[in-house]
Image: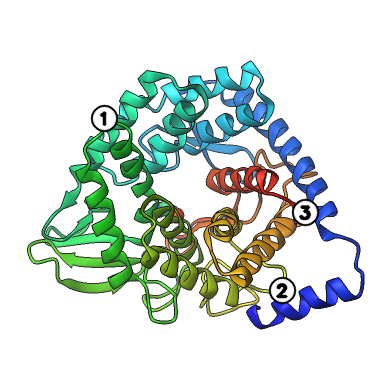
Amino acid sequence: MAKNFLLLLILAVFLGCPSPEADLNELVDTTLDFAESQLEEAVQTISDSTRFPNSTDESGDWNVTKSSSWIAGFFPGCLWYMYERTEEDRWKEWAEKWTAGMEPEKDNPGTHDLGFMIFNSFGHGHRLTENPHYKDVILQTANTLATRFDPDVGCIKSWDWMDENDYPVIIDNMMNLELLFWAAKNGGNSEWIDMAIRHALNTIENHVRPDGGTYHVVLYDQDTGEVLERITHQGYADESTWARGQAWGIYGFTMTYRETEDERFLETAQKMADYFIDHLPEDFVPYWDFNAPNIPDEERDTSAGAIAASALLELSELSADQQKKLFYRYTAENILRSLCQKPYLAKGTDSAAVLLHGVGNKPGGKQIDVALIYGDYYLIEALLRYERLPKS
Ligand code: GLY
């Protein structure tokens, strides 16, 4: 993919192609309108703010889950994004309602996913309303998340359900660091920044391979911090690169660079982005695992595409190198162009979601080729990011 990039740009300029940007602008706008109608329908259908959309069932309706699920914060996050776009009070009221439904999780020490859960709900709420209670909730949650950091290992523990001596850390966990950075910089404990940085540095050291691909899970020794094993949970194989894990890493390291300005994080985000882009198929929507054995007869994971598109838009802004800037932006735009059309967009189907064709956990036999609320969330985020960027 990378080697074709300059050639494509040169051809587009010299052959005088009509601007693909105009066409993408329209797709972005109509997709956000579609997201608005799908989310309004979900608000009316679900109604109960202790229930949160997760993935779609065979009829295309949302399966719902409780606030303690890692995905619960994405629905209020989508509602806040709609409030940001429309500035309409009804979206604010709905976002507040489902955000309040997340509050019990501020004291939940049993999960590392508190960033996903609380920063995507209360975090957006605070950003858009400056409600002081939201800030209190975020600070309290950061305090809870910090209890999962072990100084001997130098990481936040991901799961409590493995062997007692194993200390699992998954690449996804990079996403939860944003809550710690924000909280530390907004009245919380400054040590939360040190924890986030140590976690991110250990993730560079132990999850990222020399070619920029990643391991999904690293098992550390609880007492010594030594790496015991590198395995997968949702990917195809221990040595493969699971597409969503790679997307979480690109997003997480880009965010960590934004928060720290430490070049090691920028280099890692770029290395992981280059791997991701090099392994994309022609339509820019990733297969669920880059090393899945039956490509092209494997499922795509649109959620990985949406997360990566959002991350690449930010990475293009933060990268100083002009060619990299263009390359990341060009790739993000091409991912979005595909996701905003058939067969990926749910328009014209019976699905309650925005984005079809996601994969939750194929090895676990769960959520294969379904819509996923986090796919919708990151698609909406990426489209809003795209709209805010200066047009080339
Ligand atoms: N653990 C988050 C995910 O499945 O991507």
Label 3: which residue?
A: 341
Residue of label 1:
140
Q: Point out the tag, 1 or 2, that comes first from the N-terminus.
A: 1
Q: CA distance from mark 3 to mark 2?
A: 15 Å
Please name the amino acid that badge 2 sits on.
Glu
Question: x, y (%) of residue 211?
Answer: 44, 81
Query: Image point 27% across, 60% down: which residue?
Result: 169
Q: Is residue 16 left or right of residue 388?
A: right
Mark 3, Cα crowd under 10 Å, few <14 / some 14-19 / many 20+, is some
Query: In the drawing, does residue 331 fall left or right of residue 368?
Result: right
Question: Who is closer to the viewer here, 336 or 293?
Answer: 336
3 or 2: tag closer to the N-terminus: 2
Q: Residues within 10 Å of mark 2 (few under 14, many from 20)?
A: few
- Residue 56 vs 319, above or below: the answer is above
Write down the residue under mark 2. Answer: 282
Residue pictured at 79% horizontal, 41% vertical: 30
Q: Badge 1 local density, few (<14 within 10 Å), some, or many (20+)?
A: some
Q: Could you tell me which secondary element the residue under label 1 belongs to? A: helix
Question: Which element is circle 2 on?
Answer: loop
* Residue 165 position by quadrant: bottom left
Instruction: Relative to 169, say whether 195 is above or below.
Output: above
Q: Amino acid at mark 3?
A: Gln
